[in-house]
Every structure is written in C-alpha cells, then in structure tokens.
Amino acid sequence: MYNFVSPTEIKPRGWVKRQLELQRDGLCGNLDKVWPDVRDSAWIGGDREGWERVPYWLDGFLPMAYYLDDKDAIARAERYVTAILDRQQEDGWICPCTQEERATYDLWGVFLIGKVLANYCELTGSERAEKALYRTMRNLYDLMKAGEVELAKWAKHRWYECFIPLQYLHERYKEDWMLELARMLREQGANFWDFVESWKRPLNKWTQYTHIVNLVMMLKYEAVSAKLLGEEVGDAAERLWKILEKYNGTAVGSFTGDECLSGISNTRGTELCSVVELMYTCELLYAITRKPVWGERLEKLAFNALPATISDDMWTHQYLQQVNQINCIRFPGHSYFRTNNSEAHLFGLEPHFGCCTANFGQGWPRLLANNYIKENNSISVTTMIPSELHTTMKGVPVIVRIETEYPFRMDVKISVTAEKSVDFALKLRIPSYSKTYTVNGVTKNNKTLVLRKFEEGETIYTITLSDTPHMVTRPFGLKTVEYGPLVFSLPLEVEYSMKEYVRNDVERKYPYCDYELSSKSEWRYGFAEKQNFTVTKQEGDDVPFSSKAPLLTMKASLRRVGWDFAEGYDTVASPKPISNRALGAAEEFELVPYGCAKLRMTEMPIAKDK
Ligand SMILES: [Zn+2]
C-alpha cells in the first residue's frame, strides 16, 4: 500500500528490535491480560468497550508480534482477529452492535477495524481477512448509499482514515464503488479549512475541530484522497501544518492539545495519541509526496516526543506530556489542563482516559513498517533506523541491512547483499541538519544519497552524518538546544511514588500501576551566554531511550534565573522566567536527549548579567 514494501520483507535490528521487545514485555504486549476493555471487549464477545480500543490495540500489537516472530503473541493476536471475523454479520457489518444500534454507532469504529484488517492482510496474506474487509467496506457503501447510516461525531472528523482500507482494496480490485464510497465520505465529512481561525488561540472548550488527535490525522486528508481518487496532491498538508505549528507548535515537533489546541506554552500538554498518529501522518505524507520535510518531522517525533512520554519498561505512559515538565503530580484542585483532568500527566495505566493505553503501541512498529518505499526500480529509505529488508529487485533477491545506533550516533553502516549483480537505486534521505556527510570517507552534500549498481555478494557503505549542537529559538524568547534530530533537556532528579488501586473495576497493580513523579533538583536555569556544548557518547543499558543511562549526553553551562510557578499551581513552571537576569555563576550540567528525561527543562532563556 502507498508503495511501502510488504511488511513481511522487513526485520527489526539493533535498538529498534530491543524497543519492540520492551513493548512486547510491557503494557501493549500484555493488554489482553490486564485491561478489561481489551480482555473482555465486545469485539470478542465480552461486555466491555466494542468500538475503538481493540482495533487501536491490534494496530500496534499485530505488527509487533509478527516483527518479533513471537509465537505466543501471534497466537493471541490471531485469537482476536478470528473472533472478530467470526462475528461478522451476513450483510458484512462487522462491529459489535445490534441491528438497531447501527444508525447511532459511530462509524469511526468501522474505519479503524478496516485499517486493522488491511494491516493484517499485508502481514499474513489471509484471504479470509481480505474477504471480510471487502464485505465490511461494501456494507458501509450500501448503508451510506441507502441513507441508513451517516457520518457523525468522530467519524465525521476522521473520514479520510477510511481511505486507508479503501486504498488497500482498490489497489487489488479497482472497483468503482470503492471510489464512490470515498467521495461520499469526503462529502459528509468535516472540511477542516472552515475552522482554521479557531486554531489561532486556545478556545478553552472541547470541540471536534480543535481536537488535537483529529487535527494530526487530518493533515493527510488531501494526500490520501489524491492517491485513491487519482487527483493531484496539493500543498494542503504543508499549509495546514504551518498554521498549527505557528500557533500551537512544540519544541519536539508535536502540537499542544490538552486535549484541544492549547497555544504555544511549553507547559501545555500533548496527548500521546496525537504523537503516534502524527508519526503515521508524516510516514504517509513522506511516501505520497516524497518531500524530505515529512521524514524530518517524523524523526523529531519518533526520537523525542514518543519515548519521552512512555516509561523505560513501557508499562506506563502519560496521556499528556509537557516540554518543560517539572513534576507529574495530581493537581489537588482544578486541573491545570484545559479540558483534561488532574492526573492526565501521570505515568500510568490509563491516566485521564484509555485511548492512548490502547493506541500508543502503533508508534514503533509503524515506524519500521513504513521505512522502505519501493517504486520504479528503486528503494527509498525513510529513516536510517537499524533494520533489514529482504526483497527482490529485477528478479534478484537482495538484502538491505542498516546497522547503526542513530540517532545516538552519526555513523550508519549500510550493506547490500545481492545474489548476483543488479542495478537499482537505493535512495537515502539525508537530514537537512547534515550539511555535508561522508560515504566511505568521501565527502558529499547532496540531499538524497543514491547508491546503485550492486555486485554479487555484499557491498558495504559507511555513512557519517555531521552536525554541531545548536540553539533553536522558541516563543517567549526561550531557546532549546538540538543535535541531529535530538532535542536536549536538563534532566531533573525524579522521585517516583507508586499508586496501586482499583477504580471502576480497573485494577492498577505493579507493573501496570500509576506513578507520580516529583522533582528533587533545581529547575530554574537559563543557558549561559558563553557556551561550549560538548556531545559525549555514553555506554547505555538495554533500554534505547534509557532515563538511567542515556547513550548520548551534552555538556552545557547553565545559570540560575528567577522563575515562578504557574499561577495557582506549585508543581508547574510558569511558561517563562521572571526575567533573563542571571542570579549566579555558570555551572556545568549534562543535558540528555528529551526522550530520556521524564522530568525536564527544555525551553530556557539565555541568562544574562543584566
Ligand atoms: Zn489518547
């Protein structure tokens, strides 16, 4: 689909494999055992949620299980898929509700299970699942055409998500009703251009058209429409992104939304669902438009925003992350967040709401699944993450292997093993921060590195990217420091307080408990004017984005500044300091990648003598 190679041709390696293993051994890999909304879901005949949670979970759990070739996880995934297929109705309706409930069932559930089935078909080649997907979409077409169901609520604002399963089917069947269904969806669906003005200042109320997850999904509407309906891809995604970024952008490439758009403050929240969905959007936009900027945006999210908001063991996660996050403690009174509750920033099982619990698992497997694009006798690599592609080019079996600790290291070893000599183009996107780079010691500067003409056997290339730590200007005159795709933060010493309890029949028990995090160290700092940022490679542990042993650190000089708490909240920093005036001499600190710092200061002023 979308020229991505078949997921069966990809294998994880290095830190990506380790990240998937952590996911398997953590919450996503055990959700069917510990969480009632998946364990006892109506999708498999139980009495719990029968809408988005099981499909969300399967969207990450399925590819994770297959990429690790984990027999137990595959068997558990199969049990769910089989139970869902067994319950499909005679006319093709697949969601767990009665005939009478169909008219009010939010069709977002249909789109989501469609995505899951397309994903499953690509992973397994199952003919049964493909037939079921065909019948599901045909049934949706029949019901919409007859006016028996229509788009409302979530489905109305996520209509383009259904284009993904339709794309899968249309690439195989080329039947006109599929396009007609796509047009009906677009016609009934929301047009987000109507709401652009409302994105420019926080509304302080919950609406579908400022909802952060809707908006990050929405950015791909034009691209997926164009692909399916044979239209030209315009620049809608870029124009919409620019508006969202200007008024709601964060230092790590996400948008604020707690849970609707929340402005440019570094202490507003970003929902985890919006991080993984925005990654997926960037992956599709890169595949469809081939504009490098989508690959760069993807890297920033994947290497910063995603790991930051999930614990090292991947058992707990936040609903909301903050860029400057000095505590994650339940607010005793009114929540700091606009429309999310007082515990939305805790690390836990389902802080605030369980959508992210089900949905976060798609982040890492999708990054891998969408990393190789094959077209016109070429293979394009989206991001140089450790992985392996086993495919055939011009009839010749070929293995492309990427070995690296990127983004923690700048050197990448790429090998191409061909059964006999073959000519095709292996295209590598070079990030724009790397103005020059070397390939086997030879300096280059083209934006895309194209390797070709591979001899029989193994050909090895060593690519070394380059960057120097540099500051980026943020709102309120603050700065962040970046190196490669990584944003760096001052990590705060964390004290964890474990919470085990039962609420609404949902048990929180170690390791799927909640944690409050409080900072034990000083956070009121600014960058010294004189800086000699020095990046140091470190020995890690077996957690890629480890909070205990980050693989890369950066020496920086910081100075104390005056900085208050946010008004009315003594556990949240004000979005900006009282002033930039330094209150002390420069002190040396080790900054760490944002993704490794659970409590952190990321946006800081330049501290000056006066
Ligand atoms: Zn969520």
Image: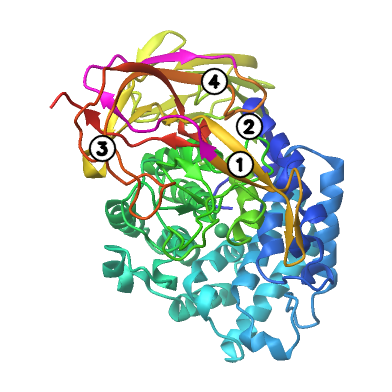
Q: Which residue is mark 2?
A: 16
Highlighted magenta segment, given as a residue range: 518-539
Q: Is residue 460 above or below residue 261?
A: above
Badge 1 element: helix
Residue at 51% x, 71% y is: 159
Which one is in front in this view, the residue at disc 4 or the one at disc 1?
Answer: 4
Which mark sits nearer the N-terminus, 3 or 4? 3
Which mark sits nearer the N-terminus, 4 or 1? 1
**Res. 364 mark:** 1
Which mark sits nearer the N-terminus, 2 or 4? 2
**Can residue 389 be seen in the rendering of this structure?**
no
Q: Which residue is mark 4?
A: 551
Badge 3 element: loop
Residue type beneath disc 2: Val
Residue in the foreground of this view, choosing between 608 and 404:
608
Q: Is residue 451 above or below residue 382?
A: above
Residue type beneath disc 1: Trp
Residue type beneath disc 3: Leu
Q: Is residue 520 inside the magenta stretch?
A: yes
Q: How many marks?
A: 4
Which mark sits nearer the N-terminus, 2 or 1? 2
- List x then y, in percent, for residue 190: 42, 75
* 17 sits to left or right of 264: right
Measure how far apart labels 2 and 4 are at the Cα level.
Answer: 14 Å
Q: Which residue is mark 3?
A: 478
Which one is in front in this view, the residue at disc 3 or the one at disc 4?
Answer: 3
**Can residue 511 be seen in the rendering of this structure?**
yes
